[in-house]
Amino acid sequence: MGSVYALDDFYLAITLLITIAYQLSFFTVAWLKKFDKLTDFAGGTNFVVLAIITLSFAAGSPASSPSTPYYSSSNSSGNGDEMVDNDGEDSGVSGDEVTKRAVQYFYDSEYGPPNARRVIASIFIMLWGARLSGFLLFRILKTGKDDRFDDKRDKFFPFLGFWVFQMLWVWTVSLPVTILNSPAVGNASQPNFGQGRDIAGVILFILGFVVESVGDAQKYRFKMVGRGKTDKGAVCDTGVWSWSRHPNYFGEILLQFSIFMICVTPAAAGTVSQRAHDALYASILGPFFLTLLLLFVSGLPLNERPAAKKRYDQGNNYEGYMEWVHRTSILIPLPPQIYQYAPIWLRRTLLMEWPIYVFDPAKHSDKAKDGGAGAAEEGRAGGDDGESARLASAGAGTSGAKQAPSTSTTQPSEIDGAPAYTKDTSTAPDAKQQPPELLDSKSAAVPSRKPVSELPGDGNDRGELPGSEAAAEVGAPVDQPPVEMGGGSAGAAPAESNSGGAGRGAELHF
């Protein structure tokens, strides 16, 4: 069995040229017509085109192997079907024997059917590309506009830059299947399909494909015909979205690594040359590239913090959204009953709740930025004694004066470095209800408050004050109930955020 040679032994050049030509043709239409609807369709279908071409280049069949006779349905002797050697000579073998030998070669030989692994891997990536491109095309036709290009649509080079990156994305992620179908691998003996890696790859692909497909369908239904259509503040927290804040990303990553597992089997079995062995293992660059793209470029960074910021600034059910964030894993599907009690160090490491995704209102909110300038000026005018002056003025009124109650706001706090949010439901007491000694401005003395750093601590690394003694030291009531900040409290949800939208890995953002 052999493969067609095209520019190089690994089909790297020919697939790159095809990808460039394919993407530039769609870019030309998009630029001239200012048309957004085919962008993601061009990306997804490009995978299908490359898989079909490289698989068709893997010419031949088990019956056309140099060492195996092939079957001819006609011959000059008119004696019926016979086996014919590769040089055209009549082998004198009957048709029944042809069938037996073909079946024996295809299933029972030491190296099995050479095309099975290629066909399955190619079909898998074609299924993924076709489903993804079809779904994204359907969605953009319904929404009518792609907001990613609002700042690029009329600028040639920024717009072209997106398409160039899409070329790189398609070509790189296709590498495992491209190299498997190449002459360097296809012309060598291969182990039977059905090795452990093959079986694991098939199972993981099915799992990833189902999770991604179901996640996309559930989110689309939620936004178009479910609660999301009537209630813009609703959070999609049902189905697979109750176990992961980005189940579609998880499924996409999983199925790409599953395709790599199938493709690398000949190298793991040691039946290919050293060059082919190294090239197959190097093709892991494809799934890694996709993973890095989703984790650090066009996936989570553009969905997590921006979505939380938007809800916070617009007052759009931010608290309900953060409760969902607190109990739901960012990527790896986990039962919420388990995840919400996971320690913060585990979230910040294996569960990938990294600081780059965290929304902190004090740092990232437009509200904080707008109000920060005035607050800063007021703070500078008051100097270091601003807090003492405020307390003194609160107690220096007349007996009939009232102090306006403070409003309830969401305040950031810190749990082992993880921002959390609790409701400050306290209100300032009326001045007329305060003890007489506090209402007498001549006799009232504002107690001095020591800095926390000077107060006795319990030796922990967060500078917490031990028990009621610490509370008495800062002037707080000894019997004041502590604020619970445990991992299981919905009010203490860490500020990890997620779009909850139907963002896709194929949607590249710059």
Image (spheres, rainbow, N blue to C red):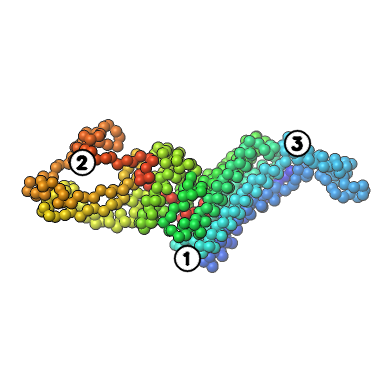
Q: Residues within 10 Å of mark 1 (few under 14, many from 20)?
A: few
Please tell me which residue lies in front, 134 or 260: 134
| Alpha-carbon span between mark 1 and mark 2 | 60 Å
| Alpha-carbon span between mark 1 and mark 3 | 60 Å
Q: Which residue is mark 1?
A: 154
Between discs 1 and 3, the one toward the N terminus? 3
Residue 460 visible to the viewer: yes
Residue 217, image x, y percentages? 54, 53
Q: Which residue is mark 2?
A: 476
Please tell me which residue lies in front, 407 or 51: 407
Q: Which residue is mark 3?
A: 108
Q: Residues within 10 Å of mark 2 (few under 14, many from 20)?
A: few
Please tell me which residue lies in front, 178 or 131: 131
Judged from the image, the secondary structure of the residue bearing numbered disc 3 is helix
Q: Amino acid at mark 1?
A: Asp
Judged from the image, the secondary structure of the residue bearing numbered disc 1 is loop
